[in-house]
Image (cartoon, rainbow, N blue to C red):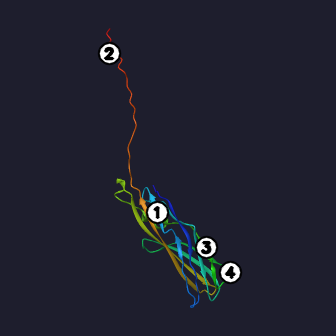
Amino acid sequence: MLIGTSGIVAAGIGAAAFSGTAAAGVETGLFGIDETYEIDSQSGRLSSLTVENICVIATWQNFDHPVDSVEWTLETSLDGDEPVEIGTASVDELEPAYSNESGVTAKMDDVDLVAVFGQEAFEVESDELYDGTDVTEEFDLVFTLPVVVTDVQGNSLEESVSGDTDLGITNLGASVSGGGTGELSDEDESGDEYDSD
């Protein structure tokens, strides 16, 4: 059985000023997500690990031409491996603006990291589990959010923000207890064996 269904919530993303001129600066924010996330599992295997409620934002300033579109790509790496794309979002047909410091936002679909990386990637196994010992393994999830802002002339500027989660999965040690109940009954000796004919 697959036990230990859990979710990770993306709290918010800030990607600040994007500029198309050399004189302007570029500021970056972060991908807001749980800094730590702990899971207790009976089997050491997860049926799902979901990043949900993903909301992304981008702001820009001092573009030479009005901005036409904004595109986001959310990538995740596990324990330092190559990042994997897990979501995209875009906004186009924007009101023409050289700057937009209030920002535009978009939503991404929920994504199950177990489906992306495979169940084996998060599995916790040990020879100690059947002596009642809990076994915990730590995983490092890094989320990277590149955002591309493009103006009506096709000029674009890309910036990337990131955030990470220290994921701990504990495979709970197995234990057994024993017990039972019983009752006593008796039958009194009648003395019939001593009767004679």
Q: Residues within 10 Å of mark 1 (few under 14, many from 20)?
A: few
- The residue mark sitting in front, 1 or 2, is 1
Towards the viewer: 14 or 123: 14
Q: Which residue is mark 4?
A: 95
Q: If you read the primary sequence from the N terminus, does the residue marked by circle 4 or circle 2 appear first?
A: 4
Q: Which residue is mark 1?
A: 38
Check disc 4 and report its element: helix, strand or loop.
loop
Towards the viewer: 140 or 92: 140
Q: If you read the primary sequence from the N terminus, does the residue marked by circle 4 or circle 1 appear first?
A: 1
Amino acid at circle 1? Glu
Q: Residues within 10 Å of mark 2 (few under 14, many from 20)?
A: few
Q: Residues within 10 Å of mark 4 (few under 14, many from 20)?
A: few
Tell me what residue is drawn at x 53 percent, y 74 percent. 31
Q: Which residue is mark 2?
A: 193
Q: If you read the primary sequence from the N terminus, does the residue marked by circle 3 or circle 1 appear first?
A: 1
Amino acid at circle 4? Glu
Question: Could you tell me residue 162's position as x and y percent?
Answer: 50, 76
Check disc 3 and report its element: helix, strand or loop.
strand
Q: Which residue is mark 3?
A: 106
Question: Could you tell me residue 78's position as x and y percent?
Answer: 44, 70
> How many angstroms separate mark 4 from mark 3 (CA)?
15 Å
Q: If you read the primary sequence from the N terminus, does the residue marked by circle 2 or circle 3 appear first?
A: 3
Question: Could you tell me residue 27's position as x and y percent?
Answer: 55, 82
Query: Measured along the vertical axis of the image, is residue 17 above or below residue 50?
Result: below
Towards the viewer: 155 or 24: 24
